[in-house]
Amino acid sequence: MKKPNKVTICLTIMALAGTLLAGCSGNNNNGGNTTTNTTEPANTTTNTPTTEDTTAPDPNTPVDGGNLVISSFSDIISVNPIYVSDTASGDIGSFLYANLYDYNRGGDIVAEPWSLAAELPAVSEDGLTYTIKLKVEAKWNDGTPVTADDVIFTFDTIRNPESASPGISSYDKIDTMTKIDAQTVAIKLKQIYSPFLYSLPVAIAPAHVLKDVPLPELQKNPYGSDPAKTVTNGPWKWTEWKNGQYITLDADPNYWGSKKPHIQKITYKIYADQNTEIQALIKGDVDLTQAVPLPMLETVKANEGLNVILAPGPQYEYLAFNFKDDNFASKVSPFKGMKTRQAVAYAINRQGMVDNILKGTGTPLNAPFLPGTWADPGDAATAYNYDAEKAKALLAEDGWVAGSDGILAKDGVKFSFELQYNAGNSRREQVAAVIQQNLKDVGIEVKTKAIDFAAWIDQNVTPGKFEAILLSWSLNSPDPSSNESIFSSAYFPPAGQNVGWYKNEKLDKLWIDGYSTADQAKRKEIYAEAGKEISTDLPYVFLYQYGLPEAHKKTIKYAEEDRPESSLAYGYFFHAINWWIAAE
Amino acid sequence: MSDTAAPVTVKGVKRAVSERPPGLWKTGWKKFSRNPFAMAGLVIVTLFVLSAVGARWIAPYDPAQIDMMFPNLPAGSEGHLLGTDELGRDIFSRLIYSSQISLLVGFSVAIVAVVIGTFIGAVSGYFGGWVDTIFMRFVDVMNAIPLLFLNILILTIFGSKFWYMILILGFTGWMGVARLVRGTFLQLREMQYVEAARAIGVSDWGIIIRHLLRNASAPIIVNATLMVGGAILSESALSYLGLGVQPPDTSWGLMLSNSREFMLVDPIQAVYPGLCILIVVLSVNFIGDGLRDALDPRKKAFKPRKGLGK
Amino acid sequence: MTEYLIRRTLQSILVMLLITVVTFILIHAAPGGPKQIYLSPNLSPEAAERQAANLGLDRPLPVQYFDWLGDLLRGDLGYTFKNNLPVGDLIWPTVGNTMILMGAAWLLSLIIAIPWGIYNSTREYGFSDQTASFIAYVGFAMPSFWFGIILQELFALKWDLLPLSDMWSMGKEGDIGDLLMHMVLPVSVLTLGFLAGYVKYARSSMLEVLDQDYIRTARAKGLGERRVVFRHALRNALIPVITVLGLDLPILVAGAALTENVFNWPGMGRMFVQMATQREYSVLMATTILIAFFVIIGNLIADILYAVVDPRVKLGRKGGASA
């Protein structure tokens, strides 16, 4: 869910292994500044994965043509911007749709030549009204112009519960939207909400195609799953979807932007699992893989034809507790004691995970704020360094007593829970195994369970039906206000993303205070307080921030300013519109 | 087999037990012990079973013991005969503990399938009529559905629990036994000794259990043995697809599945569990074939004749 | 003969119906029932109720069954849960792909197995016979996916001689040469599996025939061995082989599921496993039923062929027809 929603939030659950973010924000930042824009659809017959186009003499001059083969191990569900919620659909959406706004490398909102908006939004004096101006030339690929109606339709649909859009929380602060002229829309908020800006780098759905579809049926509409019926407005258009096998996109010869894409064809190839995916990369069948599983990283790095891009990303992994008693067989959540949760945090060897599982591609994290940003509470947050003895002491203080089998119990209920995570993610499998072992050492029984990602999100995570989960969030925007929808008791499932049913009134209030003021110094203070509170009360055990190694063939070329950016959602395709493929 | 086996029991019924001539089992063992493949299989399977039973004492480490200080040690490292995996778990210990699950599944499934198959086959063959018709249609149904697909479907619906898998593999694997038992019973029930038993008032179930089943036991055992191998393979396939054994339990199939990730780095990790499966299934099949040769009287008559023929 | 055909056909239809019943019951026996399976947990209770009514899940089971059966008979296999795609669109393309793979492996193993088995029957326990039985043992005991992985590692990655996975190279869809290259490894894996059984089977079937009195008579007449084998024995030896072919159909399809997954072959087996992980029950049900249907047709054809080839069937089968 998350794609559209992106309020600053982004919560993206990271799917698979490496994969990424399910989506949050806008992605599709393509762009850049390269020189030529000759785009004659050179539609070369794409034979080999990499293109040929033998005529390019200088490898640093962009050439048009070529087929970029991207691997994935999950298929798309729907590219309809109102419903995109999984990484694969978000990936494809990032090529098919122009965003209203885009991010630059630093995570600021900008109107790029390929963005739909002509300029940055104008914010009124009172901070309530945002006026957005679209480019006159922006067109859907059926020739209809992109207008204010499309923007209004999209946001209205997402915020209407009837549509069951996952992005609802990003737009629930909207009061009214007014069409000023065909290209201009004014959005008035109900209250000051400084992070609203980050709800704007998103793709827009075509009102002229969808406006007559009853909202409850919108999700099942072929728009988004049938290439022929999916009208888009980005540099590439959707040509084919072979279910479970591949998706192909072609550069759109009628694309409205002043910059045209160099790469003529994109193939999104679906593999049975990540192992096959990486083997195909090494073999040369695939040009780009967004996330190389860590065990294979060395092998991929050693391959001379491949570039590996590795930097910490905007995501962190966590162990979430469930506070709702109904989810446990004993009808009592064992996680209710704060000391118990702290004990769990002490018992888990986070540094060991970072060193051995992440191979140094991550750092431990104590609170849900992107390290290094203004909101990072730093030392104000409590750090839980691995200490099994301290964990045991805390558990004893909280009333847990070891039974004859060595497992702790309180009031006749054993301390035993099921830890769920998604199947096929080797990092998470390993982390789950370490947690299981670490907690066993202090007398807590953990049963691990791997479930297919999509089914798991649908059936366990979104409705908040689990005992404990191992998952990650991606922090798409440097603004920490997104934490409200994850930790506030106003956001319980199924509508909200506080899937662990965590309630802390102090925090509930701090989150609201945090976005209701425009005074930056005050905000910093508030978030420092929130960081301290959340790291003490521990709705999650925050594990670590980490990066996903992206790998691509060296024949994929881009200017320095267009290189992939690990810290952005979909940053592995950053400015892909400016990339080109050199002859091998 | 029935023709030869039957007279033995006929005599058995009439004479005192102690006077029984050297029976099927005794001559069978003699033949079996002279078959080098079957004997080798027996020795190997026995070794595997012993190590599985004694895993606690044989395995040098706890198979789930994570040691992040020593991941990915090569085979022959000090203290780790076959090295360690990505989490520093001892591969040799994991193989031994995996054998517990793999063998348990193999034998349990064979037992479940044989019990169900024997019951259905016996009832069908003995009573015939509409009972037979119904059961045999059911066999047709089960045979028409590809079992791997059916297993995947059921495990997907009901969840992957270890003992579900045993039941499911058992409930979908009994058809061969059922047909075999039914076929045998169809022949046997016409025998004179059955009529004699009936005449002296032995109940239907008494006849089925005490007389018919005993005579059908040789082929059933052969079949069950061969089924053990099939069940081990099925378990490994399901676990490989992620639908079978779930961590922290481990099985050879699951180890194989995990090792795929390390194919590029350490392909040898995929070799050990695969070899274990191959060796055990091969051994079990040798035993099964050995039993068949030893217990199937037709075979005895068959061979010499063939020798003449050519 | 006609009576036999009719009876056999009716039986097949009955079995087919039973399979739909079994599948239907399975889905309805799932914990939480079909609502758990068909409805998104995101829905509010009222919305779920409405959706259940839309899907007809609140009606009596027999009504639901016959409705569903009616849809099946009309060729409507249902829609996927996640994105409402017609299930048939997902399944049909994979059927052909699986058939290409399996057909090739099957033909290849027959072409090798029958002559080899026959040859072995004339040279019992010779080197060739021993080799065949070694292959048979190993073929039966080796996990096919393991063999596949090892072939990939060696031939595709280490020596770079053959494609690693997939059916076509990118951009070469339709190029037969490319397809053949991609088929080498998976077909080898599958062929080994089939070969094992077929050689043994052809051999023992031939031996049995050679043991018959009429063959001895033929030999006694002074016919050459070659003539005995080819003119008299072969035809009869092939009869049971044909039956096995029909009975083997389920193994054909199911056996490919693992191989397809290892080699990323876009066939039914891979699709099935993918859909199982996504909990797309309507696809799983339809696929299961469809395969069962193929299998039953296969068996029916095998039986009919059997009856045509072997006139004794009419009598011989009467007793054991239902077995």
Image (cartoon, rainbow, N blue to C red):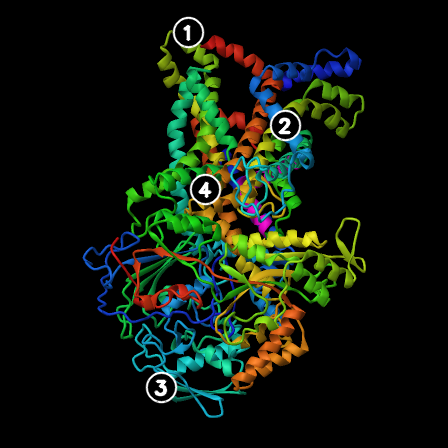
In the rendered image of this protein, does residue A155 appear above or below residue C237? below
Q: Position of residue B40 (x, y in %)?
A: 58, 21
Q: Which residue is mark 4?
A: C259
Mark carried by residue B47: 2
Q: Name the kind of residue labelled 3 in the image.
A: Ala
Which of labels 1 and 3 is toward the front? 3
**SS for tag 2?**
helix
* Label 1 with label 2: CB-CB less than 8 Å: no
- Whether residue A364 appears in this view of the structure is yes
Q: Nearer the viewer, mark 4 or mark 2?
A: 2
Label 3 SS: loop
Where is C98 relative to C124, above or below? below
The region drawn magenta spans B129-156
Secondary structure at badge 1 equals helix
Q: Which of the two marks, 2 or 3, is nearer to us in this view?
A: 2
| Chain ID at mark 1 | C
Q: Which mark is residue C220?
A: 1
* For the residues bearing labels 3 and 4, Cβ distance under 8 angstroms: no
Please state the chain letter of the residue tagged with numbered disc 3 in the rendered image: A
- Judge whether B209 appears above or below B243 on screen: above
Give the residue drawn at x 48%, y 45%: B262
In this rendering, do the residues under marks 4 and 2 share a single chain? no
The quadrant of the picture occupied by the C terminus of chain B is top left
Q: Residues within 10 Å of mark 3 (few under 14, many from 20)?
A: some
Q: Nearer the viewer, residue C166 or C223?
A: C166
Assess whether mark 1 and mark 4 are in contact (beta carbons under 8 angstroms). no
In which quadrant is the N terminus of chain B drawn? top right
Compute the Cα span from label 4 to label 1. 49 Å
Residue bearing the label numbered 3: A182
User: Is residue C268 on the magenta stretch?
Assistant: no
**Tag 4's secondary structure?**
helix
